[in-house]
Amino acid sequence: MTSQKALLGHLAALFTVFVWGVTFISTKVLLVSFSPIEIMFYRLILALFALTMVSPPRLTFFLPDLSALRGEWKAMAAGLCGVTLFFLLQNAALSYTLAANVSVLLSVIPLCTALVSRVVLKEKLKAGFFFGFAVSITGVILIAFNGSFILKLNPLGDLLTLLAALVWALYSILIKGMSADEGGTLAVTRKVFFYGLLFMLPALPLFGFRFGFERLTVLPNILNLFFLGVGGSALCFFTWNFAVHRLGPVKTSAYLYLVPMVTIAASALVLHEKITPLAGVGVALILGGMAFSEWGNVFSKNRR
């Protein structure tokens, strides 16, 4: 039964990174008509609506459960980290540095997650973890620049990206700590989006948000927003949270190395973008690093 649960976790993580890799294509299409903050707002609204339809909040006319109210801080913190801060920091970083830089630097999420897990969950890291990380991130770099070694560093943009990686690591740790008796994975995911959207509202004017409803009458815009909101956000946050519960935050985060690989393959198929031989080497390095991490028993619980 344990191996079956782990298999389901691996499948959920694979599905999640596959969809997340494709979402970059939809985002690229929508950027013609929408700003990044507008895309983010609409996809979160759609995600929250979809999750509410599937898992409606339970209403009560009696005194609230004080223990449940005390547990709300976890959902609030997860929404703040995994939704509000992560997306806002990522969007802000894209204003200062190259998209390729952001793609590479976000690939330190597994390392951030492992280090935070070491402190919070007492997971012991082995040397193999760092070797697998080095191999995989080398592959990510080759894919991100797709054979072009033009690197333009921007301290502010790169720092914002690293902060985004850190808050996502914190999100994964928080989700791991939210037990099933808090309403199940669907209910937890809905709460996370609710608080994430709530915390984001004050920031919208700062990023020049406008509703522009006329853009929502264009069919390609509707379809891509629906895919991002329902598929890339509601469904994928649910499957990601499911995977974290089954595999743990460190092992699940390692699948994020695959996102650039999926993106470049989708770009070649849909947008007919060129894949260089160095990008192909990058794919091999990512897969090799992940395989080493998995088969090399990357981490184990620190038992006292």
Image (cartoon, rainbow, N blue to C red):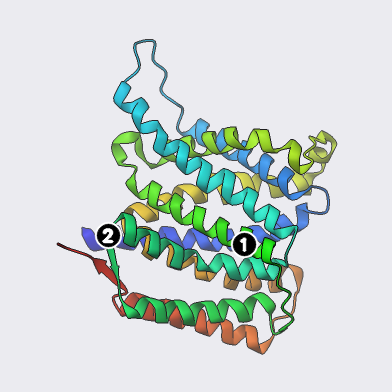
Relative to residue 225, is residue 62 depicted above or below?
above
Residue at image mark 1: 159
Q: 228 or 252: which is nearer to us?
A: 252
Q: Is residue 227 left or right of residue 1?
A: right
Q: Residue at x 71, y 84 (%)?
A: 149
User: Residue 175: x percent and y percent?
Assistant: 39, 47
Q: Quadrant of the C terminus?
A: bottom left
Relative to residue 157, is residue 77 depicted above or below?
above
The answer to which of marks 2 and 1 sits earlier in the sequence is 2
Q: Is residue 132 left or right of residue 24?
A: left
Q: 89 or 224: which is nearer to us?
A: 89
Q: Nearer the viewer, mark 2 or mark 1?
A: 1
Relative to residue 54, is residue 141 depicted above or below?
below
Discs 2, 1 touching: Cβ within 8 Å: no
Inspect the image, locate mark 2, and give the three-letter code of the amino acid beneath it: Lys
Residue at image mark 2: 122
Q: Quadrant of the N terminus?
A: bottom left
Q: Secondary structure at mark 1?
A: helix
Q: Secondary structure at mark 2?
A: loop
Relative to residue 67, is residue 152 depicted above or below?
below
Calculate the distance from the C-alpha at mark 2 to the C-alpha at mark 1.
Answer: 27 Å
Q: Is residue 70 left or right of residue 107?
A: left
Task: Answer yes or no: is residue 8 visible.
Answer: no
Q: What is the tally of numbered marks visible in this picture?
A: 2
Q: Residue furthest front?
A: 155
User: Residue 146: x percent and y percent?
Assistant: 68, 80
Within-10-Å neighbours for mark 2: few <14, some 14–19, many 20+: some
**Residue 298 occupies quadrant:** bottom left
Within-10-Å neighbours for mark 1: few <14, some 14–19, many 20+: some
Task: Answer yes or no: is residue 124 visible.
Answer: yes
